[in-house]
Amino acid sequence: MIMPTFTATALLCALCLNTASAYAQESLSIFNHAVVVTPPKTSPREHKAVTMLVEEIEKRTRIHLRTVHALPKDDTPAILVGVHTALLAIAPSKLLSAGTKRSADRPEGYIITASHSVVAVAGNDERGVLFGVGRLLRSLHLERDSIAAPHSMRIVSHPRYPLRGHQLGYRPKTNSYDAWSVPMWEQYIRDLAVFGANAVELIPPKSDDAADSHHFPLPPMQMMTEMSRLLDEYGLDVWIWYPAMERDYSNPKTVQASLKEWGDVFQKLPRVDAVFVPGGDPGHTQPKVLMAFLEKEAKVLRRSHPKAQMWVSPQGFTKVWMDEFLAILRKESPKWLTGVVFGPQVRLSLPELRAQVPSQYPIRHYPDITHSRQCEYPVPDWDTAYALTEGREGINPRPLDQAHLFRKLQKYTVGFLTYSEGCNDDVNKAIWSALGWNPDADVHEILREYSRYFVNSRHAESFAQGLLALERNWRGSLAQNEGVNATLKAFQSMEHNATLQERSNWRFQQALYRAYYDAYLRDRLIYEQGQEEEALSKLAEAQKTGSLAAMAEAERILEQAKTPQSQNLRARVFELAEALFQSIRMQLSVERYQAIGIERGANLDSIDVPLNNRKWLLKRFVEVRKQGSEDVRLEEIAAIVHWTDPGEGGFYDELGNPLRRPHLLNAEGFQSDPGTFETSRVGFCSDEGEAVRMAWLRHAESLYDAPLQMRYTKLDANAHYRLRVVYRGDSLERKIRLVANNSIEIHAPMVKPKPTHPLEFDIPAEATRNGELLLSWTGEAGRGGNGRGCQVSEVWLIRK
């Protein structure tokens, strides 16, 4: 998603808009003394929706609205709530007509009308009542001791997609969910329903996780049962993500044991609407064996829940297994199978999968909205500093990116349940839920409703703009992004004017955490980059000062980075991390909050990792000092200083840096190819204990069988060239092959060297005879899993 650039001053002004100005033209009616009117007879689920309305208003205003069963005879304001047919018995039909034809046959739809002192929410069915109440809550202006509604509303609405949900996994491998109590789950289920979600996907006690967590308030099976009960009370669908992880499902004993284990889980749950079994991640069963097992499992499922559906995904399948899976669908047309799920690690794009899966099987989307790197939809054009610190599972509001993903891909499916590992992706959930209801909804308005409802009406515009600014913070070069500091100033202004209740709001705290973290990181990055430049300038003087003196002075400069910069910003980040653990149980540190791992959102532990080549330089100094000759030491220091210099007539590309890779073809195409099935993308990896260059912690990569390509033109046809290349990435054990001009093999498939170091290969003269050169890297053909492995960090084309 291409985003506009802003000066710091302009951005700050945009963010600090007063909400009152945005709504100055909106006429509001006061409902402080209103009553909630319901039909005399309501179903338990309708009653649940009314309870949600009353309680959520009271939490925000301190005002408790009474519930009655008849319209007041005086001018007392009233909010009518119920199924449309039942409300007709107690309210004038004119009030419920909305001035337009009612979509009575549309499931989950509703009408909202408002006129002076009466608001009516009329649902087409029980869910319509719930979602109508949610829409009303998003529209109300709720302040301390004040309830206001737009003076005039006429809304007739129903959802475009029948499936709109999110995975909520009570398991150790999350950044917050494992510490939530039953009341916290009920609150979050309400929050999702307010924005139109109608399904939640649970995870069984046995998955690819530890059996227990320090944070669990209840045993997994008990909590799963409670969550199923809660969802049923609200009338929402219950899905189960159930991985088939046993070693051998061709073994009858394994099958029988699994049928019993799964059956016991199904029997204990009050409600199950569907089961989704991923083919991989985790899972490793050949399709014909897996499908035979799932046919038996579907029968077990339907003994406890007769109408429950069975879905499967081809995640992690190799090309051979994918072909086998598709052949089963086409030739056998299994009746027990409801549909196919498209999610991470599917080697076909969603349009291609839809084209190849028989039309009788609907496709459900399982988009990863929770991760920022090494994932299905990584943040495009992300600075390495962010990738190394805030990491894979940080707080990641990406409203425009998520809207683009939805609108680009959702048309191939019947709906979605997103992949989530915690509340870090809360904004993204709201975007998907709202767009699942109305794909044409304005993202900015969704964010205003999110801010108004979850934070405060006063901050509706400024907080919404702040969320967009946080997404812009993550675009392009962090050092050059002055908007990061403007974003912090805007949030500091909101923070200064916030009430104690607002400061205790975890969604407000999340945004503050990101704003402070981003700004601290930028300050430190600029400082450390400056240190490295200064250190390299001292090394460049080694011919004058001597090698040992030059390295000593460079070391002194580099060691200064161990004292953190901007201590006040850093301290505030730590304060907010503590606040988030107390308010929503976010585990932002392994040591402090017992997070399961740094990569699982515990980015407080990575806040001070080096952002320059300090570790690599210090390691090289140790190696250079071991050389007995001053001439050799000077030669090696010169190689350090001129590392990226390809020499006269040569070329250098840092493939993980969008600003330094002019020869890379098919670079990131998030707009046209968000899953990067045909284009390349930037990937990141950890140092794995090695003292490596920053350029080796990022790389360009292509997925599955797609090539990673570079093209050179205007070469000297009479010259000889040599290629220097650095292979790294997060899949060192996977082989990579290099071919020139689609026919000349430069090297056969090989594993990447460890420890990491540059490799050199001669380019045959025939490859550059025409003054051009096409280099194509490929991974292991037909490989499954996440498809990664074809990963290249640095490339020099050196003219001999």
Image (spheres, grey):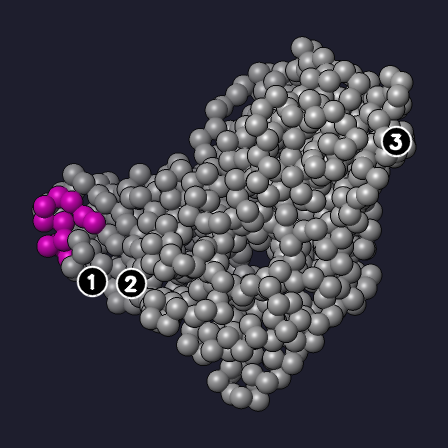
Looking at the rendered structure, the kind of residue marked 2 is: Arg
Q: How far across and how far down the image is residue 519, in percent?
A: 64, 33
| 349 vs 700, nearest the viewer | 349
**Residue drawn where x is 74% and y is 44% of the image:** 190
Distance between mark 3 and mark 2 Cα atoms:
69 Å
Magenta stretch: includes residue 616? no
Side of 13 relative to 674 (left or right):
right
Q: Quadrant of residue 564?
A: top right
Regarding residue 558, the answer to whether it shows in the image is: no
User: Residue 576, how many percent across, how many down?
Assistant: 77, 40
Identify the magenta region: 764-774
Residue 766 on the magenta segment? yes
Name the kind of residue labelled 1 in the image: Glu
Q: CA distance from mark 1 to mark 3?
A: 76 Å
Q: For this view, does 496 lie left or right of residue 393?
A: right
Q: Are marks 2 and 1 in contact (CB under 8 Å)?
A: yes
Which residue is at a point 29% across and 54% down the rendered structure image?
707
Q: Residue furthest front?
A: 89
**Quarter of the view holding residue 723:** bottom left
Point out the image quarter for the N terminus.
top left
Secondary structure, mark 2, is: strand
- Name the residue carrying label 1: 745
Q: Amino acid at mark 3?
A: Leu
Residues packed near mark 2 inside 10 Å, few (<14), some (14 to 19) or many (20 plus): some
Residue where numbered disc 3 is placed: 65
Q: Nearer the viewer, residue 506 or 292?
A: 292
Position in image of residue 194 (x %, y %): 69, 39
Q: Earlier in the sequence, mark 3 or mark 2?
A: 3
Earlier along the polypeptide chain: callout 2 or callout 1? 2
Q: What residue do we see at 69% from left, 35% from top?
A: 84
Q: Earlier in the sequence, mark 1 or mark 3?
A: 3
Where does label 2 land, which residue? 737
